[in-house]
Image (cartoon, grey):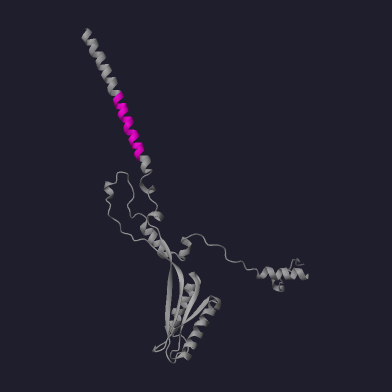
Amino acid sequence: MIFKIMDKQLLQTSAAVLLIGAVALFSSACKHFDQRVRKDHYAGSFFGDPTVDHPIRVAKDKLAISVSVRRHDEKLSPAKLNEVRTFLHYYREGGVGDIKVTLPSNSRHQYAVRKVLKDIQRQMEKLSIGPEVVAVTRYSGRGDRYPVIHLSYKRYVAHGPECGQWNKNLNETENNRNSPDWGCARQRNLAAMVANPRDLQGPRGWSPRDSRRRDTIWDKFVKGEVTAAERSRDERVDTRSDK
């Protein structure tokens, strides 16, 4: 009878020890898991930032065209006219600094060069590009069969990241992290589609205000004249009711 009581007490003690050990082991496992989760922060779509992992590089680039001049040319050919118009349109949209015009000197067909240059200036005037943003330089065209007028300017260009990093097996990612190439295609497409790459560097400032109308109103106010805009009889409303 005594041995049976001792066996019963021994079993209870052993069970209590095993329970305490199991609780301690479980707590240790939870703590290790918690530390690992805190180290990795989050999993799945919360991992990574495409703008950091696959940045878009914005830099200045040079855009240039060349217009060859023949002896009897008096204006731009239809093909060159379209090319010059496109070139100037891009300058209006995102050009930086001046348009550099390089003219041949001491070359053949100087009369034709002046005629073609005049046509280029007319295209600039149509797009409201004034002479203040045109820098003219010259080069020696002596001996050239066909003198060439060179046009160039600087602009911002967006270079997208190179994609295709499929060197990681996602079946072996225990923390469910995204692939190294995640978000790269989106960044590359954005670099190709953005209208003005300068917008990727930050917001642009306000353009200068147009104060011409304000100056006109203030001048009338100083002279004691009526500042309201004049309206024709057609713009007025007859408030009299018909009888």
Q: Which residue corresponds to the image point at 65% horizontal and 68% vertical from the top-left?
A: 211
Q: Which residue corresponds to the image point at 48% horizontal and 74% vertical from the top-left?
A: 89
Q: In this view, does 92 lie above or below 70?
A: above
Left or right of 236, for residue 91:
left
Residue placed farthest to the right in the image? 224
Residue 180, x across and y down, in percent: 33, 53
The N terminus, quarter of image: top left
Q: Which residue corresponds to the image point at 27% horizontal and 17% vertical from the top-left?
A: 13
> Foreground: 107 or 78?
107
> Foreground: 24 or 100?
100
Left or right of 27, for residue 100:
right
Q: In which quarter of the image is residue 241?
A: bottom right
Left or right of 162, for residue 111:
right
Q: Is residue 225 visible?
A: no
Q: Is residue 31 magenta?
A: yes
Q: Is residue 25 above or below residue 35?
A: above
Residue 100, x across and y down, in percent: 48, 77
Q: What stretch is highlighted in magenta?
A: 20-36
Residue 191, x across and y down, in percent: 41, 63
Q: In this view, does 140 lie above or below 220?
A: below
Q: Quadrant of residue 66?
A: bottom left
Q: In which quarter of the image is residue 140?
A: bottom left
Q: Does the magenta stretch include residue 162?
A: no
Q: Is the magenta stretch mostly helix, strand or loop?
A: helix
